[in-house]
Image (tube, helix red, strand yellow):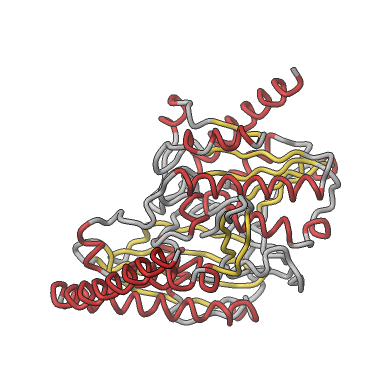
């Protein structure tokens, strides 16, 4: 053990020396472009520090908030006109607007991200299951995101959240909806780039008219956030119905659920204060604080690497760690614990994992055996090539409204098949 520790320390020292060399070499090579990008990175670092302030006053607008800008650049317009159920503010004074300009792409084109933030009349709830996740909780918000290039609007969308911070899913026929349907997942569940009436939970809810749909999707989140929501002790006070279904949406690939669960280099800036889990020598899933406290050194190295432009020049998709079976296993075990926590709360209800068919890479085969080992129910569409051919991502990197509509119908059809097979 002593020899291993000595080698590990030596490796870390050599690595840090290499990073210093690469960092300063990077500055010399990139020149003016590096200065611009470094300024953007510095703004991102300031944004991370502001997160603690955001928790105390979610409605306060932050000037030059680059974390919001990053979300906005990932976002896009609904391809159908309309405000998607975003309510107008009662007075102009209730709106707060900021514009952030930044160079993007190889040519350094200037993109303007215009964010108009206002509050709904819904009271903010003091305690929420979305607290203490290391992500900003935005409650009772009515926001509009507009991306402009060369004076022309590129895309635009709006979203509203309730007093708990959940994205609103407004459906008809509420009197007949006596069971719950909880959706957990990342920005693809939240609905980045689309309006309130164009998210996947909304389209599923239109067809599943006996279920009250709740969207617990969060941008930049992973399965570890879902687990902590279910462990929060708040869920039963937030949901009126006493039984139903929970669905965690699993996203394949290096920017999906596994990368979030392990706090990869590309995601660590957003996940630094989020729950950190690992599997110990006794094969038990253990939480050790956050990524910033439980594995402080590695997280710091990832943060440093994520800001080194030289690496991005060589390989834009480069990320650490290289995803392996052990990372898929960790992700699976977190989902298993989430399933256990949910079914402990609601013994008469069922938990499913929805494997999203529109992914970065189709590598769900790496994690499915683990789900099967622990008897996790899955809804799989990732092998339906005809369906995948009809789905598209928008310029914001998430499914388009049309894709969510198609997927909502496919989800219901496959779910009914799964239920019939379970009865047989």
Q: Is residue 195 visible?
A: no
Whether residue 102 appears in this view of the structure is yes
Q: Residue furthest front?
A: 2
Q: Is residue 201 left or right of residue 344?
A: left
Using the image as rendered, state which of residue 58 and residue 134 is in the foreground. 134
* Quadrant in the picture for residue 90: bottom right
Q: Quadrant of the N terminus?
A: bottom left
Taking the image as shown, residue 111 lies to the left or right of residue 48, namely left
Q: Residue at 72%, 24% (x, y): give it.
A: 422
Seen from the viewer's position, the closer of residues 69 and 247 is 247
Instruction: Determine the residue positioned at 27% across, 56% down.
Output: 316
Residue 200 coordinates in the image, percent (x, y) = 58, 43
Q: Position of residue 263 (x, y in %)?
A: 48, 60
**Residue 258: percent from left, percent from top:** 49, 50
Location of residue 69 by image quarter: bottom left
Q: Residue at x 29, y 69 (%)?
A: 15
Residue 240 left/right relative to 99: right
Q: Is residue 385 above or below residue 7?
A: above
Residue 34, x across and y down, in percent:
21, 75
For residue 254, side relative to residue 22 (left or right): right
* Image quadrant containing the C terminus: top right
Which sits in the foreground, 291 or 213?
Answer: 291
Q: How many marks?
A: 0
Where residue 11 sits, quadrant-wise, is bottom left
Does 132 appear above or below 256?
below
Residue 210 position (above or below residue 293) = above
């Amino acid at each position: 053990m002593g020899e291993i520790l000595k080698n590990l320390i030596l490796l870390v020292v050599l690595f840090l020396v290499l990073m210093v060399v690469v960092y300063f070499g990077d500055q010399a090579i990139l020149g003016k472009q590096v200065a611009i990008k470094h300024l953007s990175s510095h703004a991102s670092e300031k944004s991370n520090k502001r997160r603690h302030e955001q928790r105390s006053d979610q409605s306060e607008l932050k000037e030059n908030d680059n974390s919001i800008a990053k979300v906005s650049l990932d976002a896009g317009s609904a391809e159908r006109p309309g405000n998607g159920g975003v309510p107008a503010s009662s007075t102009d004074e209730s709106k707060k607007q900021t514009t952030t300009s930044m160079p993007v792409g190889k040519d350094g084109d200037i993109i303007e991200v215009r964010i108009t933030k206002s509050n709904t009349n819904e009271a903010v709830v003091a305690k929420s299951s979305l607290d203490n996740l290391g992500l900003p909780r935005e409650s009772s918000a009515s926001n509009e995101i507009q991306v402009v290039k060369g004076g022309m609007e590129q895309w635009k969308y709006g979203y509203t959240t309730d007093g708990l911070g959940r994205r609103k899913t407004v459906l008809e026929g509420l009197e007949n909806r006596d069971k719950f349907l909880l959706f957990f997942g990342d920005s693809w569940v939240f609905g980045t780039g689309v309006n309130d009436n164009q998210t996947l939970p909304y389209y599923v809810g239109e067809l599943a008219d006996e279920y009250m749909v709740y969207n617990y999707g969060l941008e930049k989140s992973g399965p570890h956030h879902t687990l902590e929501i279910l462990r929060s002790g708040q869920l039963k006070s937030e949901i009126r119905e006493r039984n139903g279904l929970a669905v965690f949406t699993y996203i394949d690939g290096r920017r999906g659920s596994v990368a979030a669960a392990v706090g990869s280099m590309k995601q660590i800036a957003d996940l630094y204060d989020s729950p950190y889990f690992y599997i110990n020598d006794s094969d038990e899933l253990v939480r050790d604080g956050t990524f910033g406290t439980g594995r402080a050194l590695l997280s710091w190295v990832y943060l440093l690497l994520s800001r080194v432009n030289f690496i991005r020049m060589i390989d834009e998709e480069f990320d650490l760690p290289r995803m392996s079976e052990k990372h898929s296993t960790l992700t699976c075990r977190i989902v298993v614990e989430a399933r256990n926590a949910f079914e402990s709360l609601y013994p008469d209800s069922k938990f499913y994992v929805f494997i999203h068919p529109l992914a970065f890479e189709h590598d769900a085969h790496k994690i499915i055996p683990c789900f099967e080992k622990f008897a996790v129910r899955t809804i799989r569409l990732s092998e339906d090539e005809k369906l995948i051919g009809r789905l598209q991502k928008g310029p914001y990197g998430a499914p388009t409204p049309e894709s969510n509509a198609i997927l909502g119908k496919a989800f219901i059809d496959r779910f009914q098949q799964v239920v019939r097979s379970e009865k047989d």
